[in-house]
Amino acid sequence: MLLLASIAFLASCGTGGGERGEELPVLTVTIEPLRSLTEAIAADRFRVVSMVPRGSSPETYDPTPGQLVDLSRSRAYLRIGYIGFEQTWMERLEENAPHMRVFDTSEGIDLIHDSGHHHHATAEADHHHHHAHGVEPHVWNSAANARIIAGNILKALCTLDTLHRAEYVQRHDSLLRRIDRVDSLCRARLSASGTQRTFLIYHPALSYFARDYGLQQVAIETDGKEPSAATLKELVGFCRQNSVHTVFVQPEFDRRSAEAIARQTGSRVVDINPLNPDWEAEMLHIAETLASKDN
């Protein structure tokens, strides 16, 4: 076991990338959107793997024993910041792979802090759902934040592999242009007449998206649990009073509450996936839904 650990450590000490025929050094990230953003800059210099697989919730996921073993081969871990998986597991992951560098890609983001307000709060304090350290953790669902995350990824890669810094800078700049394009398209769509300024969502994953574009997010769940009958009644009244026509629901959550509200208010239930590895497509899908004339 000691010999295997020593081999893993020595393998991690080289510069990033490798010649043809050599196994690429591994970077581990928490979620799929962060994997995609990291791959856009790292390209073929690193192999990037996610701890939380597609279809699983990063609030509650527990890694498999195999993932913990595989982590010993990782040069570094890029965390998204404050998501539940990291709050529960990060210390143990670092103990399991003491050679592994850890980088926080949320550094420099203007964080939204939980306030304990209820459904009809503003975009800056939009849910009665408490997270670890009082921080709203879905930082990647924002073009403004994605730019910062990309910059932190660049810093991490240049720290790990100074030899190919120029390549990383070039690809980082290209990624920023793509992020700016998404931001511009979202702003154009959401500035159109008829755009919904308030929307319902099962789990409040679009707090930063709402802040970016001056929207109001209203969460269905209460403290991470299914809403009570009284809460559902209150939400139905809120939707009718405020002409809310869209209820977003994520694949990892039960959609029955969203469908019950939609039936009583004439709203539509729209599937979104804030954990979609195609970050650009998902941001545009959300903006286009809110700007749609078929509300």
Image: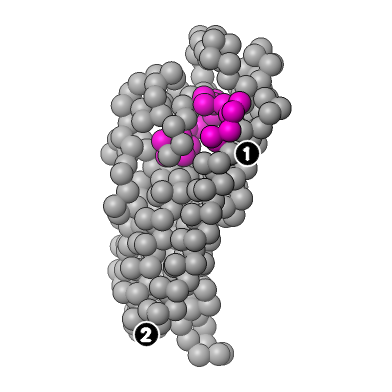
**Residue 91 rendering spot, x and y as whole percentages:** 30, 55
Residue 95 image label: none
**In the rendered image, is residue 285 in sight?**
yes
Residue name at image x 45 percent, y 23 percent: 222
- Neighbor class of circle 1 (other Cα within 10 Å; few <14, some 14-19, many 20+) is some
Q: Label 1, on which residue? A: 288
Left or right: 34, with 76 as reference point: right
Say above or below: 196 vs 62: above
- Bin the neighbour count of mark 2 within 10 Å (Cα to Cα): few under 14, some 14-19, many 20 and up: few
Q: Secondary structure at mark 1?
A: helix
**Residue placed most toward the observer, 282 or 52:** 282
Determine the residue located farthest toward the right in the rendered image.
294
Using the image, tell me which numbered label, if any, was put on residue 163. 2
Tell me which segment is drawn in magenta: 190-211
Q: Quadrant of the N terminus?
A: bottom left
In space, the residues marked 2 and 1 are separated at their CA atoms by 42 Å
**Is 246 displayed left or right of 142 in the figure?**
right
Query: From the viewer's perspective, is residue 165 above or below residue 127?
Result: below
Closer to the observer: label 2 or label 1?
A: 1
Q: Amino acid at mark 2?
A: Leu
Residue lying at 50% horizontally and 32% vertically, measured from the top left = 203
Is residue 199 found inside the magenta-colored segment of the image?
yes
What residue is at 32 percent from the left and 42 percent from the top? Answer: 111
The answer to if 6 sits in the magenta stretch is no
How many marks can you see?
Answer: 2
Residue 207, quarter of picture = top left
Indicate which disc, 2 or 1, sits on the residue closer to the N terminus: 2
SS under mark 2:
helix
Q: Which amino acid is tagged 1? A: Glu
Where residue 257 appears, x then y in whole percent?
A: 60, 22
Question: Visible in this render: residue 85?
Answer: no
